[in-house]
Image: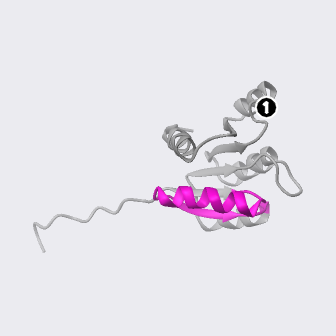
Amino acid sequence: MIGEPLEVVKKQTTILLLSSDSNIRLVLQEVLEAKGYVVLPAGDLSRAVDWLGRCGPDLLIVRPYLSGISGYEAALYLRTKCHGLRILMVGGFLDDERIQYRASLKAIEVFPKPFTAGEFLQKVSAVLATTQ
């Protein structure tokens, strides 16, 4: 009816989660979904590419080591398919200064283990707040 407020449709934030370790993928997915994010789980690069073809995620979360390819290489490849894609690499050994420097050159945020669910969600929120 005229004069009734329009319903505002808020786009849910979509996160592509790429990890070949199904246990880690499941835990991170549960944490993210509990916070209200839509999570697209991918166990390998081809599944991640398939998700990119269906929707443009707001963020890619990737593990540093995948089956057959490094997470860094996978992230750079996926960014060629979805320009401006924000990337967060989470996992072990990411506190090495060489890794931090290399990632910074390509605008990839890194978040080393160990971390709590709350710390992880804060980092995700911070990365989503950045502009590419």
Residue type at the position of mark 1: Ile
In the depicted view, which residue is nearer to us: 89 or 56? 89
How many residues crowd mark 1 within 10 Å: few (<14), some (14–19), many (20+)? Answer: few
Q: Residue furthest bottom?
A: 1
Q: Relative to residue 119, is residue 109 drawn left or right?
A: right
Q: Please provide percent x and percent y for residue 110.
A: 68, 37
Give the residue drawn at x 65%, y 44%: 87
Q: Relative to residue 37, is residue 89 drawn left or right?
A: right
Can residue 52 be seen by looking at this rendering? no
Q: Relative to residue 35, is residue 109 drawn left or right?
A: right
SS at mark 1 in the image:
helix
- Point out the stretch of residues depicted in magenta: 18-45
In the depicted view, which residue is nearer to us: 24 or 60? 24
In the depicted view, which residue is nearer to us: 32 or 71? 32
The verdict on residue 49 being magenta is: no
Can residue 92 be seen by looking at this rendering? yes
Position of the C terminus by quadrant: top right
Q: Relative to residue 82, is residue 14 drawn left or right?
A: left
Q: Residue furthest right?
A: 68
Which residue is label 1 attached to? 99
Position of the N terminus by quadrant: bottom left
Q: Please provide percent x and percent y for residue 82.
A: 65, 53
Q: Please provide percent x and percent y for residue 35.
A: 47, 55
Give the residue drawn at x 66%, y 65%: 51
The verdict on residue 30 being magenta is: yes
